[in-house]
């Protein structure tokens, strides 16, 4: 009787287990490459870990001393301000310009493929290549842009250094970053525009809506989620700005272009003071999350 009432043993379902088995190596690698570094970054941020000193003397737990030193440092506070300022202005400019270009290319009756290819070229170039190319173009000694300005009558621009003048260094780096990353926004929004139903445009046209009204009441509502995705992705990427600053200005002049990543490189990585650098990395991560929350909430709410 008891044997008859016993529950049958569950058989191993190979079909259900196969996807999990195939994903297991990838999950393990991702855990090793993400969770492990994050955990140790958090741990080291509360220590005085220095790679050279730790070999002989080890390291000590110092609680929040690294974070206190960070926020007491005027250069770090300037780096936070510069990073947030750069991110806001760059992301807004890239999104607006990319949207306008996407709408324009999408409205072309012919030549869209050619325009897409040409517009994507700046984004396909490596960041280092872009920075070096612009450094040559804006060189104070042999740059063609300065020479062109001189030929136009601006004699003071003969030996003008765009990257080491307080009034132009920040905005020059900003302009180069916008030039390179507008194509990313353009591509994403252009793809979204392909999915806007033509019937909505036809209905709006029949109702007497002009071009601006069709853009405001038809185009924007249909691609709203893509716009917020662009804002989120560009915010995260721009906040990590390092390559252009390190090549073009090294954070100068007078820290006007110093970003958080540039500061951490100079005072954390180069000095091998990984405890201090880990604390700065945590602060940067928290700031990115705080800037990203409004985009995420708006994107979720728009669905």
Image (cartoon, rainbow, N blue to C red):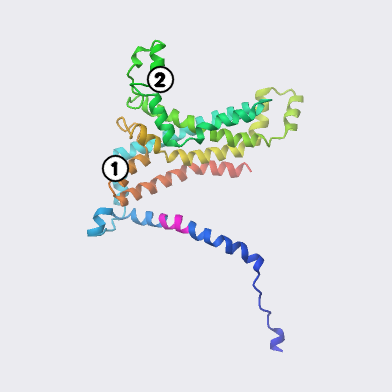
At 31% from the left edge and 45% from the top edge, which residue is drawn? 70
In the rendered image, the vertical position of residue 122 relative to residue 282, given as above or below: above
Q: Does the magenta portion include 224? A: no
Q: Looking at this view, is 297 or 2 the one in front? A: 2
Choose mark 1 or mark 2, whichever is in front.
2
> In the image, is 276 to the left or to the right of 219?
left
Q: Give the spatial CA distance, label 1 vs label 2.
A: 43 Å
In the rendered image, the vertical position of residue 94 relative to residue 68, given as above or below: above
Q: Looking at this view, is 291 or 124 the one in front? A: 124
Q: Earlier in the sequence, mark 1 or mark 2?
A: 1
Q: Looking at this view, is 279 or 138 the one in front? A: 138
Determine crowd level at label 1: few under 14, some 14-19, many 20+ residues with C-alpha closer than 10 A.
few
Outermost residue on the top side: it is 153
Q: Quadrant of residue 146?
A: top left
Q: Position of residue 227 (x, y in %)?
A: 58, 36
Determine crowd level at label 2: few under 14, some 14-19, many 20+ residues with C-alpha closer than 10 A.
some
Residue range of the region highlighted in magenta in the rendering: 31-37
Q: Position of residue 5 (x, y in %)?
A: 71, 84
Outermost residue on the left side: it is 56
Report the residue marked by disc 1: 72
Q: Position of residue 4 (x, y in %)?
A: 72, 86
Report the residue marked by disc 2: 144
């Amino acid at each position: 009787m008891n044997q008859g009432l016993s529950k049958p043993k569950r058989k191993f379902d190979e079909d259900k287990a196969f996807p999990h088995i195939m994903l297991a190596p990838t999950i393990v690698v991702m855990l090793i490459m993400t969770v492990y570094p994050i955990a140790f970054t958090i741990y080291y941020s509360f220590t005085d870990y220095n790679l050279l000193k730790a070999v002989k003397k080890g390291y000590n737990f110092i609680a929040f001393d690294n974070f206190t030193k960070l926020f007491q440092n005027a250069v770090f506070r300037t780096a936070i301000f510069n990073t947030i300022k750069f991110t806001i202005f760059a992301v807004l400019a890239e999104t607006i310009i990319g949207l306008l270009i996407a709408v324009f290319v999408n409205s072309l009756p012919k030549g869209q493929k050619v325009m897409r290819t040409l517009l994507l070229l700046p984004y396909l170039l490596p960041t280092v290549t872009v920075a070096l190319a612009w450094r040559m173009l804006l060189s104070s000694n042999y740059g063609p842009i300065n020479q062109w300005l001189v030929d136009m009558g601006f004699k003071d621009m003969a030996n003008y250094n765009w990257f080491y003048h307080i009034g132009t260094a920040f905005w020059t780096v900003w302009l180069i970053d916008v030039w390179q990353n507008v194509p990313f926004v353009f591509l994403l929004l252009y793809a979204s525009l392909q999915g806007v139903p033509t019937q909505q445009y036809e209905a709006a046209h029949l109702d007497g809506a002009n071009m601006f009204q069709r853009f405001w009441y038809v185009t924007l509502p249909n691609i709203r989620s893509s716009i917020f995705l662009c804002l989120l992705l560009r915010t995260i990427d721009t906040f990590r700005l390092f390559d252009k600053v390190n090549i073009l200005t090294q954070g100068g002049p007078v820290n006007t272009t110093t970003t958080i990543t540039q500061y951490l490189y100079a005072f954390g990585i180069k000095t091998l003071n990984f405890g201090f650098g880990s604390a700065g990395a945590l602060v940067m991560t928290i700031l990115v999350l705080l800037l990203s929350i409004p985009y995420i909430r708006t994107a979720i709410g728009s669905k």
